């Protein structure tokens, strides 16, 4: 069954204005169907016809991440390991929490996936990619790019109980850091309240 998407998604994936998309459908450059008042577009067929998803343009990426600047040496080791095992792969790295889904590197990977450019993504551990949302990212890569994620250290994955425990500790650490960050402003807030 062909994959039809909305006008907004089609415009984003193709990088065209909606007027251009309308013209393309009118001129039969892209297959479209009308569902009620909305038109949907067959992006898969268009990309296949135009050769947009050829394997030569698809990316092979190794993703490395650490949580803080204190772990930069660990990040360097991760990158060196990836370069050794996968010399022709693009390396993308981040220094940020696994709970932060707005990381620059992760955003770049998701954008590649949505554009159909991602063939394979290599990560050392699942939680290097994302503490939560791994399954969603994996589904995006499979659906839009027909790609896959390879986890290098699957044998060392934790049991569900261990994962939940680690996740809860991560969440507690984030809120503790936020509370500690607010303490430094406590004096300023008290002074402002006294003035008013």
Image (cartoon, helix red, strand yellow):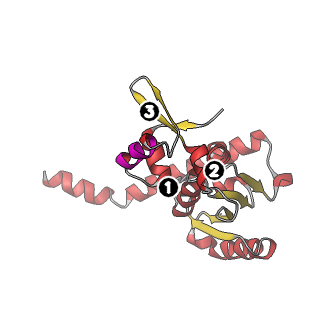
Instruction: Classify the position of the N terminus by image quarter.
Output: top right
Q: What separation in Å lies between label 3 and label 2 (alpha carbons)?
A: 20 Å
Q: What separation in Å lies between label 3 and label 1 (alpha carbons)?
A: 31 Å
Task: Tell me the crowding category of disc 3: few under 14, some 14 to 19, or many 20 or more residues within 10 angstroms, Cα based.
Answer: some
Q: Secondary structure at mark 1?
A: loop
Instruction: Relative to 16, say whether 33 is above or below.
Output: above
Task: Tell me the crowding category of disc 1: few under 14, some 14 to 19, or many 20 or more residues within 10 angstroms, Cα based.
Answer: few
Instruction: Relative to 117, say whether 42 is above or below.
Output: above
For marks 3 and 2 on the same chain, the one whose residue lies earlier in the sequence: 3
Q: Which residue is mark 3?
A: 39
Dot 2 and dot 1 residues touching (CB under 8 Å)? no
Q: Secondary structure at mark 3?
A: strand
Give the residue at x 51% y 44%: 30
Q: Is 153 displayed left or right of 177 in the figure? A: right
Task: Tell me the crowding category of disc 2: few under 14, some 14 to 19, or many 20 or more residues within 10 angstroms, Cα based.
Answer: few
Which sits in the foreground, 52 or 127? 52
Image position, residue 194 (x, y; %): 17, 53
Q: Which residue is mark 1?
A: 102
Q: Which residues are magenta?
A: 19-25
């Amino acid at each position: 069954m062909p994959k039809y998407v909305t006008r907004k998604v089609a415009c984003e994936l193709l990088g065209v204005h909606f007027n251009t998309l309308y013209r393309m459908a009118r001129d039969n450059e892209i297959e479209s169907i009308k569902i009620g008042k909305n038109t949907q577009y067959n992006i898969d067929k268009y990309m296949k016809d135009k050769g947009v998803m050829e394997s030569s343009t698809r990316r092979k990426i190794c993703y490395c991440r650490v949580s803080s600047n204190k772990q930069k040496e660990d990040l360097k080791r991760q990158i060196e390991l990836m370069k050794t095992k996968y010399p022709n792969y693009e390396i993308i790295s981040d220094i940020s929490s696994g709970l932060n889904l707005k990381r620059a590197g992760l955003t770049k990977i998701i954008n590649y996936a949505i554009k159909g450019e991602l063939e394979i993504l290599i990560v050392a551990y699942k939680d290097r990619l994302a503490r939560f949302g791994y399954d969603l990212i994996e589904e995006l890569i499979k659906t839009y790019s027909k790609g896959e994620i390879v986890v290098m250290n699957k044998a060392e994955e934790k049991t569900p109980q261990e994962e939940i425990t680690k996740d809860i500790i991560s969440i507690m650490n984030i809120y503790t850091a936020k509370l500690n960050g607010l303490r430094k402003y406590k004096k300023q807030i008290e002074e402002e309240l006294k003035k008013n």
